[in-house]
Image: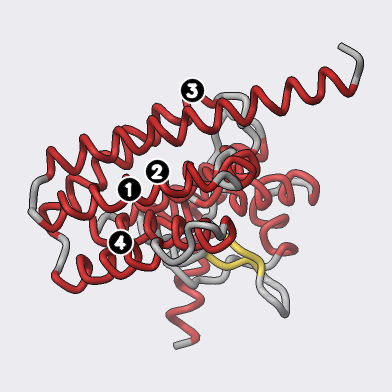
Amino acid sequence: MARKADGKLLAITSALRSQDKQGVAQSVVNRILDLVRTRLLRPGDRLPSERQLIEILDISRPSLREALRALSMLGVIESRHGGGAFVTDLEARTLLAPLDFFLSLSETNLGDAFESRRIVEIEIVRKAAKQATEADIADLNAIVAAHEKILEDPVGFRILDSRFHRKLSDAAGNVVLERIAYGLYNMGLDIRRRATENPVLIRQSTEDHIRIVEAIARRDPEQAAVEMGIHLDHIEESTRRTMALDMSTFARASGG
């Protein structure tokens, strides 16, 4: 076992020592990504120690740490308790996690965000209408039935709304779409929290959800897509109204 591990370390060392003309940190990132792509590094593998990597790569400690930070942000490696850098599980939810961070910083791009939500979530409901199981449909019906009990409860509605959209993604059965949808759903969430204080909006969203589920239950992907498009139009309209109200309130408060 020790001989096998030593052989793998030698192979990794040889690959890491290859040279290119890019910046030092970027070069290290690319070489480690190549090791992952060629499966010389696999999920759960531990990278050589920091001291070994500095010696192998003949680079400075700051350059190495810059490269490791970049790989961590990409979701490719993670630091674990007890020391050491390890290759992550490389699942889509891990590799796409930085998208959530990017979207959380991009609330000014509201139009782009909703356009993206339409592309992703409309495809999700199409897929859900084609392949949702009876258990999936039962779960969706249970969620919309629960909506009727919280029409005056904004917090309860937001909890159920999140469950509803995640269940649609789950029923669609595509983990990449699920992760992207999750990131887009969370964009501008603080604004939508204020929008959902309005019972009229809660009722409207509940009715939208019911029609979406009915189309999925009928195995009608195109009607499900239409209903989701209408639902997202309603969400965007209410989000923009809330943003406009916020801006107006701020202007009055600041004497503008």
Residue 78 x/y as whole percent:
61, 63
Three-letter code, disc 4: Asp
Give the class, few, some or many, for how many residues have Cα within 10 Å of label 2's Cα (few <14, many ≥20): some
Give the label on residue 204, or none. 2
In this view, the residue in front, 208 or 165, is: 208
* CB contact under 8 Å: marks 2 and 1: yes
The residue at the point 48 percent across, 78 percent down is: 5
Three-letter code, disc 3: Gly
Q: Nearer the viewer, mark 2 or mark 3?
A: 2
In primary-sequence order, the first of circles 4 and 1 is 4
Residue 126 visible, this orientation:
yes
Three-letter code, disc 2: Gln
Q: CA distance from mark 2 to mark 3?
A: 21 Å
Which quadrant holds the N terminus?
bottom left
Give the label on residue 170, or none. 4
Q: Which residue is mark 1?
A: 207
* CB contact under 8 Å: marks 4 and 3: no
Q: CA distance from mark 4 to mark 1?
A: 21 Å
Residue 144 x/y as whole percent:
33, 61
